[in-house]
Amino acid sequence: MRILGINALYHDPAAALLVDGRISAAAEEERFSRRKHGKRPVPFAAWELPELAAAWCLDSAGLRPEDLDAITYSFDPSLHLAPAELGVFDPWDELRHRYAVTAPDFLATALPGLDPSKVRFVPHHVAHAASAGLAAPFGGDCAVLVLDGRGEQHSHLAGVYSGGNLQTLYSQQLPHSLGLLYEDGTQHLGFLRSSDEYKVMALASYGKPRHLDYLRQHVHATGDGGFRTVGVEWDVLTKKREPAQPWGPEHADLAASLQAVLEEVLHDLATWLYEQSGSRNLALAGGVALNCVANTKLWRDSPFEQVWVQPAAGDAGTALGGALSAAQDLGDPMAPFTGADLGRGWSDDEIEQVLRTARLPFDRPADIAQDVATALADDSIVAWVQGRSEYGPRALGHRSLMAHPGREANLQRLNDVKGREQFRPVAPMVLASRASELFSGGPMPSPYMLFVHDVAPEWQQRIPAVVHVDGTARIQTVDPADEPLVARMLQSFEQQTGLPVVVNTSLNTAGRPMVDSPMDALECFGSTPVDLLAIGPFAVRRPALGSGR
Ligand SMILES: [Fe+2]
């Protein structure tokens, strides 16, 4: 079966292609359109389809739209309820509903040849659940917990996968929503809602949860699998921060309080699900599952033995989840999820052609991994563009910006390159074989940067650039079997410095999507003080441009 999954309605439009149960391709529209998140998550943008990502998914597999057996759309308009019935204020919601109903015809227009009668609507939270539960590497049944802003009527699904079939145990109906609550807090703290929630998570480490008692009055689990989130008056706690205003302790305290109450409710929901599901393994999905601090608390404190998060846990992942759900329904065998490198890639010849067209001086070292390790040891900043790009918001060694972790100033240096706030941490990639020596308190391996770990005290001074203010780091463990090139670079860096760790952050600048194509890489390299661009087997060096370092 050839199944194309589409996510379009709310956040992060994306497409994914399954061929006979195997993930052939998955990519977010933002990497093609070069607009962060693809679009703003507002009703009048709901019609916008991931047409570039979808066309590429098909093209990469040599398929035409008429070759598809099914197309999934991760929202079911037949489950739609009017905002007044849900208790939410959303005066333009009818637009969303109308666009969803007409999505099959829109898709047939965007992808000529596609048969609109083959479009299946998959309930939003079922698509999220499948994106984790059917992709998880547990090798069997698992519990699944979905938490996001909203779907058709709900913001949550607690269920269990058994033999590939989902049994829903509870779904919390709107207006209660942990995702919308966190978005409200994000907006009150002067950040962009539905986009900057991870900034609130980072800011929380600087504060004390002194508003926790107040928040608990309005935000709590109800003991039956659901929860309440309504009634928080943010102004009572802290005056709204304007975006240009510097943040202070009161903002950090509010962020810490919001983070703490989220973690408490998640713990209660997970405990309930553990008892109801009878499973020892938990798969997480939904935008809330991108909160790596909360994920770690769940892994550490909940009764579940294993916790797994699919790297595209936000709405982009429902493109894959919808397709997986349809594949299960249609009886396709399901291949396990083996890595996030599901986006576009280029051959060496194609990359060389782009470099020649740009008339850039470049060279082809004997081993680009060794060359990069030497540059990093020399305290260069390296843009690393290798293989297929990542599905999901994290750079995992395919579109990465790298630096020496032993130089504390590199945190500020990288945040300056990226135009980011200085309270934002950067993360370490570490050889999987060495990870337990440096990091603890989170699951191992941790290949997708979805958990935080405590940095061993004796290592904190050795890798200061990647240690957050609370002594943690959001690690990516690198296994040579999965990522041979990155592992070789890390091994070479360790031989030169004694450190099995390199700083890894996403290759983009403020407000822009991650670099995807060689052209994107050159634009980023040309506009930032990056010393070395390692693209495929080629090296483009800053001094060669005449500017020096
Ligand atoms: Fe969602």
Image (cartoon, rainbow, N blue to C red):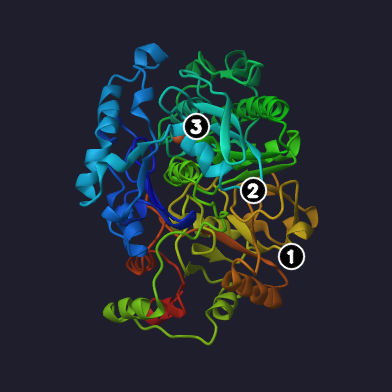
Q: Position of residue 525 (x, y in %)?
A: 39, 68
Q: Which comes sooner in the sequence, label 1 or label 3?
A: 3
Relative to 23, residue 225 above or below: above
Viewer-proximal residue, 155 or 18?
18
Amino acid at dot 3: Asp
Q: Residue furthest bottom?
A: 366
Left or right of 349? Residue 134 is: right
Left or right of 78? Residue 381 is: right
- In the picture, residue 37 is in which quadrant? top left
Viewer-proximal residue, 313 or 109?
109
Q: Position of residue 302 (x, y in %)?
A: 73, 33
Q: Which residue is mark 2?
A: 468
Which disc, if any, is residue 148?
3
How much space separates mark 2 and mark 1, taking CA atoms? 23 Å
Q: Position of residue 103 (x, y in %)?
A: 27, 37
Relative to 291, residue 178 above or below: above
**Ligand 1 falls in which quarter?**
top left
Q: Position of residue 62 (x, y in %)?
A: 33, 65
Q: Residue furthest front?
A: 331
Amino acid at dot 2: His
